[in-house]
Image (cartoon, grey):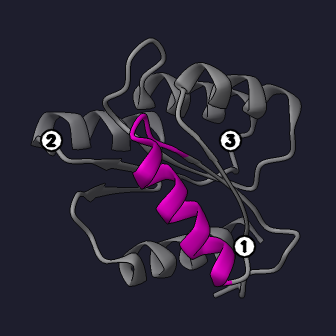
Amino acid sequence: MREPSEQTRVLVVDDRPEMADMLADDLRDRGYDSLAVTSGTEALRMLQTERIDALVTDVRMPEVDGLALLRASVRLDPSRPVIMMTAYGTLDTAIEASSEGAYHYLVKPFRLEELVQILRQALGRRG
């Protein structure tokens, strides 16, 4: 598994600012260059204009939701891992996310260690 570096840029997207900030702060504490945004629209702009190595996104958000971000991310960079997270986990959504190219699907609440381990594995596969 690849260890994080300050050059490994992770975009965290959640429409709840406290969740986005907490996850980005925790990932930063573990050596990632992590950014938090609370809007799918802003995340989409960043995916199109900035180097993002991994995307961690909530599924349910207003305007641009996590599945739309997943599709855009796969279209722009098929090798970029996308980790989906939701408090409303359903089998149908998990299957859809997986079939659209999500690396992993986490149901909230989850342990930060679980996210970090999945992120390391995903980035290790990316090379």
The structure residue drawn at horizontal position 34% and vertical position 35%, both measured from the top left corner, is 59
Amino acid at the residue labelled 2: Tyr
Is residue 42 covered in magenta?
no
Residue 83 seen in render: no
Q: Which residues are magenta?
A: 13-30
The quadrant of the picture occupied by the N terminus is bottom right
Q: Which residue is mark 2?
A: 88
Amino acid at the residue labelled 1: Tyr
The quadrant of the picture occupied by the C terminus is bottom right
Few, some or many residues within 10 Å of mark 1 (<14, 14–19, 20+): some
Q: Position of residue 81 (x, y in %)?
A: 60, 54
Nearer to the camera, 77 or 87: 87
Magenta segment's dominant SS is: helix
The structure residue drawn at horizontal position 24% and vertical position 43%, both measured from the top left corner, is 94
Q: CA distance from mark 1 to mark 2?
A: 27 Å
Q: CA distance from mark 2 to mark 3?
A: 26 Å
Rendered position, 120 above or below 36: below
Q: Position of residue 95 (x, y in %)?
A: 24, 40
Q: Which mark is residue 63?
A: none
Left-right relation of 7 to 3: right
